[in-house]
Image (spheres, rainbow, N blue to C red):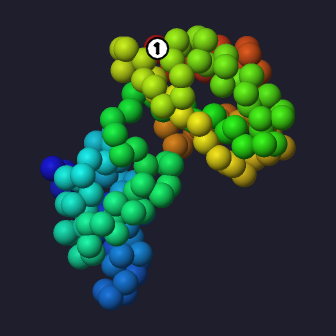
Amino acid sequence: MLSQQCYQKIDRELAKYPADQRQSAVMASLAHAQVELGWLSPETMQEIADYIGMPAIAVQEVATFYNMFNIKPVGQHKITVCTNLPCALSGGERAAQRIKDALGIDFRDTTADGKFTLMEGECMGACGDAPVMLVNNHRMCSFMSDAKIDALLEDLNK
């Protein structure tokens, strides 16, 4: 299921830890698998568990605990809006509503064309930059005014 290139990346992560602590590479392994596949199916989590040598339930516990991991298919662009209190008070709710209105979806929904998924997120550690959002778990967007949201959506829609 995972490519040889993905296994090479996982092997580099495993090499960072002693042989008896291979489970320490589980988060990085899940991240590499998700980049390759877009989400983490039960079969993918089992494959990682087998490769690392840990119980599949332990891998699933990690994948379901952190909201950066997608345990069901998501759109091409996953936008996570911080709705924690500081962001909510500083425009997070407005920013989320702007995206909902523009895309015609709610939190945890994906657009019909499969391009966008909107998620609600907890603190992203950038309260002073509120409202903030994360695109595909890798790109932090700060001070998101309506104009910046519109430009972001336009750019991602290309």
On screen, residue 104 above or below 21: above
Residue drawn at (31%, 86%) of the image: 19
Question: Seen in the image, is 5 located left or right of residue 74?
Answer: left
State the residue position of label 1.
Answer: 158
Which quadrant of the figure has residue 148?
top right
What is the x, y in percent for residue 108?
48, 31
Amino acid type at circle 1 is Lys
Total numbered labels placed on residues in the image = 1
Residue drawn at (59%, 36%) of the image: 120
Question: Seen in the image, is 115 located left or right of residue 36?
Answer: right
On screen, residue 56 above or below 69: below
Q: Secondary structure at mark 1?
A: loop
For mark 1, does the 10 Å Cα neighbourhood hold few (<14), some (14 to 19), or many (20 or more) residues? few
Q: Is residue 45 visible?
A: yes
Of 63 and 134, which appears nearest the observer?
63
Residue drawn at (77%, 38%) of the image: 87
Residue drawn at (73%, 14%) of the image: 147
Question: Seen in the image, is 60 located left or right of residue 82?
Answer: left
What is the x, y in percent for residue 56?
26, 66
On screen, residue 88 above or below 62: above
Which quadrant of the figure has residue 129?
top right
Which quadrant of the figure has residue 155?
top right
Of 156 and 100, which appears nearest the observer?
100
Question: Seen in the image, is 60 located left or right of residue 91?
Answer: left
Which residue is situated farthest in the left direction here? 1
Q: Is residue 29 visible?
A: no
